[in-house]
Image (tube, helix red, strand yellow):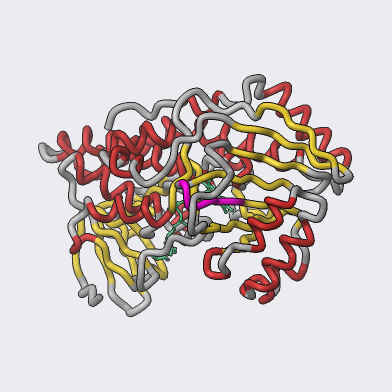
Amino acid sequence: MNVSEQEQDIVIVGGGICGLATALALRRKGIKSMVLERSETLRAAGVGIIMQPNGWRALDQLGVAAKLRQTCTEIPSGVFISVAEGKYRESELPLGKGELRCLKRMELMKALTEELPVESVYLGCRAVSIVLDPLTSNPLLQLHDGTLIKAKIVIGCDGVNSIISKFVGVNSPKLFSRCATRGFTYYEGAHSFGDKFRFYSSNDVTLGQLPVTDKLVYWFLTRVLTSQDLSDAKKDPTYITKASLEAIKGFPEEIVELVKNTEPKALYLTELRYRAPWDLVHAKFRKGTVVVAGDAMHAMCPFISQGGGASLEDAVVLARCLSEKLKQAKEGGGNRLVEEALDEYVRERRMRVFWLSLQTYFMGLAQDNTSKVKKALGIAGLILVFGDQRSHTDYDCGRL
Ligand SMILES: Cc1cc2nc3c(=O)[nH]c(=O)nc-3n(C[C@H](O)[C@H](O)[C@H](O)COP(=O)(O)OP(=O)(O)OC[C@H]3O[C@@H](n4cnc5c(N)ncnc54)[C@H](O)[C@@H]3O)c2cc1C
């Protein structure tokens, strides 16, 4: 795609879940935007994504929930299974009040993209730098091919290693001590896992398994990160399968089979990076008319499965705040009103993403068996600060 030197009103950097959802939310409010995605195709790395009631509320506002519900089974209940020395103890796994489903990431990306004009998403366009024009204070965005885009507003949805976050002044993400493997397993006939969310926990390993449809099962596994996981080995599917099978020795046979039957192309090993919760309290998420959303703002580990849901909430809130002020800006007061809108968005999102990140952080510590102190801190934090550990799913981002 050839992007000539040009002026644009709103440029969204990153065509992941957050970038596409933000473009769609703006479109629903009658506002045009341009999405720049560095990959040549829309990527959906990570196969599945758990969507909780708060995420579904945001998808309802974006007008794509009904279509997505047809692609995946509703999960009404959960079971927690503790694994120790070949013995399994089951108890109830409390889920939030409302809808829980596991989506194919690709279906989510497709549903968002289908509602956008084709000409608004530019693939193969990598933003390499951004500055504020000393004369107009508007952002100037440089692309990998030398193209310069003069934008009125830039929204950084460029993920955990965001260059836009760096520009606005958010601290770099940190590497967590655990890693995650995710996989999809297809069954020719219907699988026998039923419609429950099963969560297995042994000394050092957790494994979650959820149905997507009656023929497709999603699973994720977290374990301690090793130096091999950080090397090129992680690109080799045989390594990922071997390391996963090693981690789940002693787990029930059907889980071992589930992992063995995962096709290599539906298998991902990811190191986990996060923005420290305490950094989110004071971070500047806006500079001039440049702002961040999604993982670029609040990357968190996946222990409460909320990064994607929170990114959809960001999209709804940001579009709502911007549309109010852009209407007034037409009568004058341009940049000042935009900055006010972006500040309103940041105010509305800051504490929501702080609490999600803090709960995720404690959850990660509680799973850490390499340090008794960290584990105790994680458990204490969860009990003392988050009495009801599912209340994060009650959040409603409001109407678009
Ligand atoms: C193991 C794991 C499991 C998870 N499970 C869940 C879950 O079950 N439920 C849930 O809600 N969340 C989950 N998450 C979190 C969720 O995946 C993220 O929060 C979500 O994908 C964030 O979306 P995003 O659009 O902000 O970032 P991304 O999905 O990372 O998208 C960023 C996009 O920006 C593009 N980009 C980057 N730099 C540039 C550039 N310079 N120029 C142009 N384009 C650029 C990238 O190519 C990418 O397409 C999980 C995360 C992990 C790691």
* In the foreground, 209 or 312: 209
How many marks do you count on the picture? 0
Q: What stretch is highlighted in magenta?
A: 214-219
Q: Where is residue 335 in the image (x, y as percent from the top left)?
A: 25, 44
* In the foreground, 188 or 33: 188
Q: Where is residue 87 in the image (x, y as percent from the top left)?
A: 84, 40
Quarter of the rendering containing residue 398: top left
Quarter of the rendering containing residue 324: top left
Q: Where is residue 364 in the image (x, y as percent from the top left)?
A: 71, 42
The reply to whether residue 166 is in sight is no
As drawn, the residue found furthest toward the front would be 189
Residue 392: in magenta span: no
Most common secondary structure along the magenta stretch: strand
Seen in the picture, residue 242 relative to 219 is either above or below; the reply is below
* In the foreground, 132 or 24: 24
Q: Is residue 211 left or right of residue 4?
A: right
* In the foreground, 287 or 5: 5
Seen in the picture, residue 39 relative to 256 is either above or below; the reply is below
Q: Is residue 298 left or right of residue 329?
A: right
Instruction: State the residue at coordinates (37%, 76%).
Output: 144
Q: Quadrant of the N terminus?
A: bottom left
Instruction: State the residue at coordinates (15%, 43%).
Output: 30
As drawn, the residue found furthest toward the bottom would be 145
Q: Quadrant of the C terminus?
A: top left
The reply to whether residue 45 is in sight is yes
